[in-house]
């Protein structure tokens, strides 16, 4: 478990060649009992396509934990259009939701992808179609389109916007017997595919934080023997130093409007919370005392900050109003609560919560005051990051003696693991919606 003060270790950063095989491997470990049954029929004419679109949709919906997916191996009828769907056959499987589609080459690395979602309760053929979409994309865009199709299907059936097109940032730690370990700040699709390094260093990297538009990431590095907060453009790799005051420069967190960063500085002594105007660099001090104040997180309306403080003796969550500076305690259940963040609706707070000496991911209902542990792990968990729709929480944990990423639904019913294939993964951050 990386404790409260551990946000301060870094050194010289170096860019080195990167292995394209560094991806996460998603494993569903717990799904919803009575998950929604759906048939994903393999799309027609996609043998020569660079990506298996229906296979990606199948994996997305299956790994969401909310669907029981009937895919290629469970089917013996393979219609590619609503007119050819047999209501009796698919109902005999126990599913009333069916996705059919086709991929057609247009030449010149251009493809047309069409799909239909049918609800058998509405009738057969065209009467049962609830989604009917057609797209033209390049081969390189096909995986991105498959995730978009998953989002559309997920939202149509559950009423909640999908998160399959989002991305995650995290730090991969590579350990060697006879060489120094390395730290890589990576960005990947939410299912672990298409990883791309932003920074590769012989020293720790931590606290990645996405901008609200998903175009930039702030993080902490320790270059020139001094801790600093950097801002990097995800697309171009261009970056700039935002803060390198003497002492701690840590835990950057973006304001909802993308104009400010909350951060932790110790330039005047104890770690305190500040807010920086990104354009001008102007600082406003938010807390001003001799306690350890760290891990700021903005409220959805941008009017207050959650943060971790030891002012009550042990780490607990507090809220400070930016207008007036009034401070109130948020967490009371247990002797260790840290690294808090709001769900998108502002009704819940996800955090690290210690139970019987083990650090778990928990969620606090702000209306009732009820705290609920979400994940079941024998190892410590930390660094919770809430998905933009509030349905899932990304975190890191210890499994099989290695640090891996995990996901748990905000109701605790769905759990996944995402072990890194080329090292250990930690300190994750979930992107906002991208477009």
Image: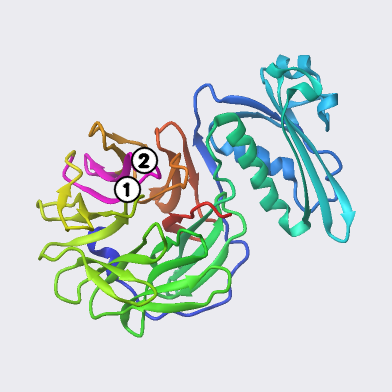
- Comparing 9 with 324, the one in front is 324
Q: Residue at x 29, y 65 (%)?
A: 7
Residue 412, horizontal then vertical, whole percent? 40, 34
Is 348 part of what is drawn in magenta?
yes
Residue 232 vs 60, above or below: the answer is below
Is 165 part of what is drawn in magenta?
no
Q: Secondary structure at mark 2?
A: loop
Q: Is residue 129 left or right of residue 17?
A: right
Number of the label disc, if any, that sits on residue 377: 2
Q: How many marks?
A: 2
Magenta range:
334-359
Q: Residue at x 24, y 55 (%)?
A: 307
Check disc 2: other Cα within 10 Å, few if <14, some if 14-19, many if 20+: some
Q: Tell me if I can see residue 159 in this picture.
A: yes
Residue 380 vs 291, above or below: the answer is above
Check disc 1: other Cα within 10 Å, few if <14, some if 14-19, many if 20+: many
Where, quadrant-wise, is the N terminus in this rendering?
Answer: bottom left
Q: Is there CB contact under 8 Å for labels 2 and 1? A: yes
Q: Furthest residue to the right?
A: 107
Locate residue 173: give its quadrant: bottom left
Residue 268 vs 349, above or below: the answer is below
Number of the label disc, if any, that sits on residue 138: none
Locate residue 289: give its quadrant: bottom left
Name the residue beneath numbered marker 1: 380
Q: Whole-Å distance between the Cαs marked 2 and 1?
A: 7 Å
Residue 393, horizontal then vertical, whole percent? 42, 44
Q: Residue at x 35, y 85 (%)?
A: 224
């Amino acid at each position: 478990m990386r404790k409260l003060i551990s946000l301060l270790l870094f050194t010289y950063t170096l860019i080195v060649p990167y292995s394209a095989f560094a991806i996460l491997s998603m494993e569903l470990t717990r799904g919803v009992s009575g998950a929604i049954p759906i048939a994903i029929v393999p799309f027609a004419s996609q043998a020569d396509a660079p990506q298996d679109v229906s296979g990606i949709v199948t994996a997305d919906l299956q790994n969401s934990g909310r669907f029981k997916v009937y895919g290629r191996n469970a089917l013996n009828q393979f219609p590619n259009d609503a007119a050819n769907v047999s209501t009796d056959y698919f109902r005999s499987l126990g599913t009333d939701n069916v996705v059919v589609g086709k991929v057609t080459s247009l030449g010149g690395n251009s493809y047309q992808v069409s799909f239909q979602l049918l609800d058998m309760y509405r009738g057969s053929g065209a009467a049962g179609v609830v989604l009917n979409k057609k797209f033209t994309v390049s081969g390189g865009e096909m995986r991105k389109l498959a995730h978009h199709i998953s989002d559309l299907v997920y939202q149509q059936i559950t009423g909640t916007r999908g998160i399959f097109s989002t991305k995650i940032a995290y730090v991969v730690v590579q350990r060697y017997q006879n060489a120094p370990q390395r730290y890589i700040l990576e960005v990947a699709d939410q299912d672990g595919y298409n990883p791309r390094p932003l920074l590769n260093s012989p020293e720790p990297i931590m606290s990645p934080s996405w901008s609200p538009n998903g175009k930039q990431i702030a993080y902490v590095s320790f270059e020139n023997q001094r801790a600093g907060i950097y801002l990097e453009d995800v697309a171009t790799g261009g970056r700039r130093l935002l803060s390198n005051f003497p002492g701690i420069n840590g835990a950057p967190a973006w304001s909802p409007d993308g104009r400010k960063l909350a951060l932790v500085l110790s330039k005047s002594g104890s770690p305190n919370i500040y807010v920086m105007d990104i354009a001008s660099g102007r600082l406003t001090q938010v807390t001003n005392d001799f306690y350890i104040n760290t891990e700021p997180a903005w409220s959805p309306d941008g009017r207050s900050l959650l943060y971790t403080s030891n002012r009550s003796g042990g780490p607990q969550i507090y809220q400070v109003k930016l207008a007036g500076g009034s401070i109130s305690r948020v967490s009371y259940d247990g002797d260790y609560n840290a690294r808090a963040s709001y769900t998108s609706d502002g009704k819940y707070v996800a955090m690290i919560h210690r139970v019987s000496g083990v650090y778990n991911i928990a969620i606090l209902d702000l209306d009732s005051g009820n705290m609920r542990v979400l994940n079941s792990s024998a190892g410590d968990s930390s660094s919770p990051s809430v998905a933009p729709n509030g349905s899932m929480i990304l975190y890191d944990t210890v499994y099989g003696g290695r640090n891996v990423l995990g996901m748990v639904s905000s109701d605790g019913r769905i759990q996944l693991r995402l072990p890194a294939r080329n090292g250990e993964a930690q300190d994750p951050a979930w992107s906002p919606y991208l477009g």
